[in-house]
Amino acid sequence: MRVLGWGVIILLGALVLCPAVAYLDFTSLPGDIHVNYGNGEVYLPLASSLVASVVLTLLFWLLRK
């Protein structure tokens, strides 16, 4: 039951943060790799993943205290 509660909190947090992230337009940070070739493309969000990891780590660290 406790895991379900955390899941609901995370889902609600994501729903609240999605419009904020869309408004701030974090589509591509320096360090993200985007390659177009022929009929395809590859996007590797390295910097965005690092920022998201740091933010989530700090958030969960603060929630544990």
Image: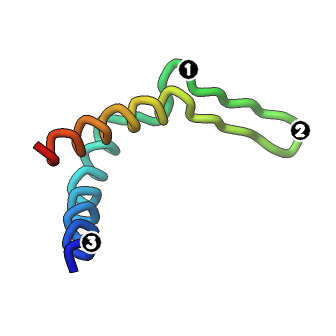
Outermost residue, front side: 65
Which residue is at the front of the view, 37 or 58? 58
Which of the two discs, 3 and 2, labels the residue nearer the N terminus?
3
Q: Nearer the viewer, mark 3 or mark 1?
A: 3
Extreme right residue here?
38
> Mark 2 belongs to which amino acid?
Gly
From this view, report whether residue 22 is shown above or below residue 1: above
Residue 58 drawn above or below residue 30: below
Quadrant where the image shows the N terminus? bottom left
Q: Residue at x 64, y 27 (%)?
A: 33
The mark nearer the N terminus, 3 or 1, is 3
Residue occupying the point 46% across, 30% down: 50
Q: Horizontal and vertical percent for residue 41?
A: 76, 40
Q: Earlier in the sequence, mark 1 or mark 2?
A: 1
Q: Where does label 1 land, which residue? A: 31
- Rounded to the nearest angstrom, the CA distance separating label 1 from label 2 is 23 Å
Q: Amino acid at mark 1?
A: Gly
Q: Amino acid at mark 3?
A: Val
Name the residue beneath numbered marker 2. 38
Q: Secondary structure at mark 1?
A: loop
Q: Residues within 10 Å of mark 2 (few under 14, many from 20)?
A: few
Give residue 5's position: percent from left, percent from top. 19, 72
Between 58 and 35, which is closer to the camera in this rendering?
58
